[in-house]
Amino acid sequence: MNENSYDVTVIIPVYNTEEFVEESILSVLDEKELNVELLLIDDGSTDDSAKIIDYYADQNLSVKAFHQPNKGLSSARNLGLENASGKYICYLDSDDYYIPGKLAQAFHLCEEKKLDLLFMTYMNFFYDNLAKEKWNIHRTEQVMRRGSYPQEPVTGIELLNSFQAQDEFSVMVCMQMAKRSMIEEHHIRYIDDIIFEDAPYTYQVVLHSKRAMACNEALFRRRIRDNSLEHRPANVKRCLGAFRGIMPMIHSMQSVHGEFGNYRNAVSAELQRRFRFTARAYHELEQEKRGEFYECCTDEEKILFDSFIKLYSDECEKNQKFKSLKRKTNYYRKKLKRNKRKIKNFEIPLSLK
């Protein structure tokens, strides 16, 4: 098959997911309606994941396996982008899987509407009862976005505004289908060696998309595991990841050259959200770890931190103290009322009269 005939390239980074990766691979290969290129990026796995992806690459011309030392999710996805040849790009995590027929549905909608970017959605499911008990706030058996969105293409910035108006914006890249030519034109890549890499990447894709849409069809099923990266406690690396995504987002905003029209608030709101997110991550660090975080920053990052993040973090601390004081005040107010009622209803014993 001529590589230029691929409709979609699906990039799956793989790291120690031997238990799940075959299900992810088969969910792509079962999509018979499309010419799909599948790029499997082994990111230094120490289990049998590498053997599994090599097996499928040997069996299928459209499947390519790559191996690299453990460099992280960003590096693995970037390696996939460098080797992709499909008209559109999709990502899938190696412990999730596509819902049958939905990848083709996404592609046909992109083709029909000549889209640069399509957002679909997903459905959660729990890996086991431990995950279910710990993360039961996640809706299951329901699509994760249910708002009302334009039925015809709009700019990515207009779509961002619609997402924010309905409080449904998500930076998760696995529910996106984006035109590869647009990604290459603006050289959109992930930032290496950070966590929360989805945010700056998605921000770039959205800002540069001239024709974008969202539909509430679930593209994939997302497995919630207790030990997944998303569900780990705050630490210095996570805080740095959140923080180091901000400057590239600012550069992305500048590269659009002010073409925001009436949607400046939507663009700035997402930057503000990342500032608050970083501030909360920093606020959750122990005092000693805060110093460690600060020492990891460059001079430029320290200026950015001192100018913005520290202010948000101090505000978090004030709010926390205020809420704590308010709780205590309410407690003593209720206790005083109870004591007043007791005093009012108290009767002096006859023997003391």
Image (cartoon, rainbow, N blue to C red):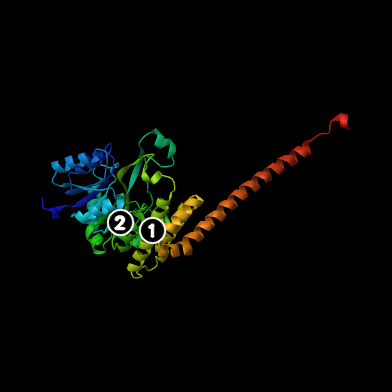
Q: Residues within 10 Å of mark 2 (few under 14, many from 20)?
A: many
Q: Position of residue 199 (x, y in %)?
A: 36, 55
Quadrant of the rendered image containing residue 277:
bottom left
Residue 298 in sight here:
yes
Residue depicted at x 39% and y 33%: 129
- Tell me the SS state at disc 2: loop
Q: Residues within 10 Å of mark 1 (few under 14, many from 20)?
A: many
Residue 280 in sight here:
no
Q: Position of residue 144 (x, y in %)?
A: 37, 46
Which residue lies under the disc numbered 2? 190
Residue depicted at x 77% and y 36%: 345
Q: Is residue 160 above or below residue 18?
A: below
| Residue lying furthest bottom | 257
Residue depicted at x 26% and y 54%: 78
Q: Is residue 27 above or below residue 244?
A: above
Which residue lies under the disc numbered 1? 244
